[in-house]
Image (tube, grey):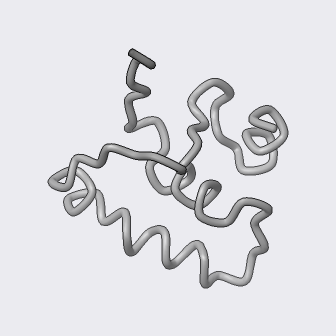
Amino acid sequence: MQESQCAKYNIAYGIYFNSGIMLINILFWCQGDITFKSLRLLNNGDKYQYSNQNVLNIAVGKRRIILARK
């Protein structure tokens, strides 16, 4: 799934994240205008297979950290 979504939305393979559980840096979120970017993507007429997840990956880009499982 990650490979197809990365290719479809021009996201570097290996940085795509599942948006089910996220720890958000609120300062970064606000400074990066992530809410506005996400809503703009959702309302631009494109159809996303996993809308919230695809849009968040596009809006956040490489500026994210995957936490260790432990």
Measured from the top left, where is residue 55 in percent x and y?
58, 61
Measured from the top left, where is residue 1 in percent x and y?
81, 38
Along the viewing direction, whichever of 26 and 40 lies nearer the viewer: 26
Measured from the top left, where is residue 60 in percent x and y?
44, 49
- Is 60 left or right of 53, judged from the image as shown? left
Along the viewing direction, whichever of 10 and 22 lies nearer the viewer: 22
Residue 29 lies in what quarter of the image?
A: bottom left
Q: Residue at x 65, y 40 (%)?
A: 11
- Is 50 left or right of 25, judged from the image as shown? right
> Farthest residue toward the front?
70
> Farthest residue toward the left?
27
Vertical arrangement, residue 70 with respect to residue 30, above or below: above
Q: Residue at x 37, y 63 (%)?
A: 34
Question: Considering the image in quadrants, where does the C terminus appear?
Answer: top left
Along the viewing direction, whichever of 49 and 32 lies nearer the viewer: 49
Vertical arrangement, residue 32 with respect to residue 62, above or below: below
Number of numbered labels in the structure image: 0
Residue 66 lies in what quarter of the image?
A: top left
Measured from the top left, where is residue 46 in percent x and y?
75, 75
Vertical arrangement, residue 43 with respect to residue 61, above or below: below
Q: Residue at x 22, y 63 (%)?
A: 30
- Is 47 left or right of 59, judged from the image as shown? right
Q: Residue at x 75, y 66 (%)?
A: 48
- Is 11 left or right of 69, judged from the image as shown? right
